[in-house]
Amino acid sequence: MKFLDEAKVYIRSGDGGAGSVSFHREKFIEFGGPDGGDGGRGGDVWIEAVNGLNTLIDFRFQQHFKGATGGHGMGRNRTGAKGESVTLKVPVGTQVFEEDKETLICDLTHEGERFRLAAGGNGGFGNAHFKSATNQAPRWANPGLEGEEKTIWLRLKLIADAGLVGLPNAGKSTFLATVTRARPKIANYPFTTLHPNLGVASIDGREFILADIPGLIEGAHEGVGIGDRFLGHVERTRVLLHLVSSLEEDVAAAYTTVRKELAAYDAALGEKQEIVALSQVDILDPETLKEKKAALEKASGGPVHAISAVAQIGMTEVQRELAAIIRAEEARLGITAPDPVEDRGRHDKWEP
């Protein structure tokens, strides 16, 4: 399935049904009076976050969504039926913006979360509503109110626990393919990854979601290369894994380039917790590895992991540190997740 993270959609809620002008006619009832019913309410337009979706590709083939018009009122005080509502089903993490692409309408971050984008018009009153002591035979009724219409933008920001960042060919896709069941495209040329990929990693009985985005180069925030449009998919992560390839002549410069692009995109993203790793270290001799690791530690101001996804060097330690930071952030935010290790131990022993 092709990945699409932005879509323009036109929505319109249903018009309200018109009220009815009717008078009661029945044998032996000389003065039946008005009995026109009210019109039904127009259908609403809703948006709902559902499980099982990770792209907005459906909105490439359908961009118009309209609620049904409410039923018209009828005689014998019969009210028209309510118009059928329409629901846009989107992935968790979808944001809805006004046509200016800046005004946020809603942000759907949880499965099952719903929001009404446009309310249906109210149905018009039938002539029975206007009956009074001084006007016992009104011959008019209200038309239904028109529905709302607008153009909106849908923007998807994937929900992941950890994000992979780095220059092109830093080994991000290889890392993702090694620790998860995801199968991103891997090749020996820049910008192999053209859209974000998700995978579920597992370490010590705990799982977390890992997001891989296309590589960043200098000037990405100005549109150079693929640009920074995919950085939104790591905004919601709790930690970043910054990979720097051992093939880089100047690993410090490679690290600084990506850090500048993160800060240029969003200052909060530049301040997010980060784990730095020197990747593809299986191609280095011990002395060169020591030099590049020291240079990267000086540039990042912290410890650096030496890893190789192909040779399985240092992978377990990095995953454990990622999981530890994710657990700490969840505890800080008051998010509790079941511990499969503890749960398994609890049920293994039978108690009367």
Image: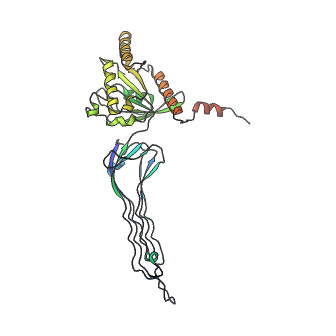
- Looking at the image, which is closer to me, 216 or 126? 126
Q: Residue at x 38, y 13 (%)?
A: 294
Q: Is residue 91 above or below residue 210?
A: below
Q: Quadrant of residue 86?
A: bottom left
Residue 176 horizontal/vertical position (percent): 41, 29
Residue 322 horizontal/vertical position (percent): 47, 27
Give the quarter of the figure containing the N terminus. Answer: top left
Q: Is residue 323 above or below residue 195?
A: above
Q: Quadrant of residue 19?
A: bottom left
Residue lying furthest right: 352
Is 103 left, or right, of 334 in this rendering?
left
- Looking at the image, which is closer to me, 326 or 247? 326
Give the quarter of the figure containing the C terminus. Answer: top right
Q: Is residue 183 above or below residue 133?
A: above
Does residue 300 appear anywhere in the picture? yes
Does residue 247 appear anywhere in the picture? no
Q: Residue at x 49, y 30 (%)?
A: 326
Q: Is residue 289 above or below residue 20?
A: above
